[in-house]
Amino acid sequence: MKYFLYFCKLAISIGSIFLFMRNVFIIILLSVCYAGVGRVDGQELPEKNAVVSLSDSAVEALYAEGKGLFLQKEYARAAEVFSKMISLNASLATAYNDRGSCYRMLGAYERAAADYSSAIMYRPCAIYYCNRGSIRVKMDDYEGAVSDYSLAHALDSTYYLALNNRGIVYLNMGAYRRAVEDFSACIRLNPSNHLLYNNRGIAYYKLKEFEKSISDFDTAISLNADYGNAYLHRGNLKEMLDDDAGACEDWSHASVLGVRQAENCLKNCRN
């Protein structure tokens, strides 16, 4: 009898430990915020958050429907579907974020900002702050955008798009040195991205650090020979440095790659 009671107590203890570990696992799972792959400019929806509790098959189906409509550029209809998701689960952060992306594409920036704020309230994620930052840029609220991108970077220091976007805002604000710092930090995180070198090249140009600028445009082109904007910017810089032949050659490349602005520049070469 004594051994039987001991066995019962042991079983209860093991069961309690198992229950405790299961609860810890659930808490950890719910605390993870997965920022899915997607461009921050809103052309694509991020993949579904791992934290979404979609045990309800109806909510799961609505998510798939809304995402499909968004990819088909049916933004108004997609927004309606995400609204239905919210009616079923008012704390579903991804539904607010995705509906905000629909409103952004529809040009309803106030509504988009409100939805991104709701998403952040329920689950503060780097991508949600980044999305709200992009809306604040649209609304000419540069200080607010810098704040959001900074918060996104604070939440995920490896999320280089937040730094890139903040760097672009600094360019628009005339804070060129800060822009260089952000683009340089991005390049350390993602040294094979041609866009980052192009952006830093523009910032160096604004600072009149022309050797560094042309080096960055060279690197951008070496990483992606089909990126026309880098040829355009390098051509503009070469013209300023009195390398007219080099400028015309770069503008010609840019024009062939579909950069319309290069056509106007080429008029100088034909005169």
Image (cartoon, helix red, strand yellow):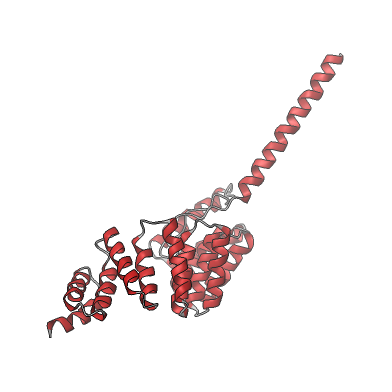
Say which quarter of the image contains residue 164. Answer: bottom left
Question: Camera-side residue: 135 or 154?
Answer: 154
The C terminus, quarter of image:
bottom left
Say which quarter of the image contains residue 192. Answer: bottom left
Determine whether 236 is above or below 130 in the image: below
Query: Can the viewer see residue 107?
Result: no
Which residue is rendered at x = 34% and y = 69% of the image? 212
Determine whether 17 is above or below 164 in the image: above
The N terminus, quarter of image:
top right
Q: Is residue 91 left or right of residue 15?
A: left
Question: Camera-side residue: 222 or 68?
Answer: 222
Determine whether 171 is above or below 67 in the image: below
Q: Percent x, y for residue 18?
A: 70, 32
Which residue is rendered at x = 38% and y = 64% of the image? 196
Q: Is residue 111 left or right of residue 223?
A: right
Which residue is rendered at x = 43% and y = 64% of the image? 184
Query: Can the viewer see residue 243?
Result: yes
Q: Percent x, y for residue 218?
A: 28, 65
Q: Is residue 233 left or right of residue 10?
A: left
Question: Camera-side residue: 97 or 174?
Answer: 174
Which residue is rendered at x = 36% and y = 74% of the image? 209
In the displayed image of the protein, which residue is found farthest to the bottom?
271
Q: How many marks?
A: 0
Q: Percent x, y for residue 248?
A: 18, 76
Q: Percent x, y for residue 40?
A: 45, 64
Question: Camera-side residue: 6 or 179?
Answer: 179
In the displayed image of the protein, which residue is found farthest to the right?
2
Q: Is residue 257 left or right of residue 73?
A: left
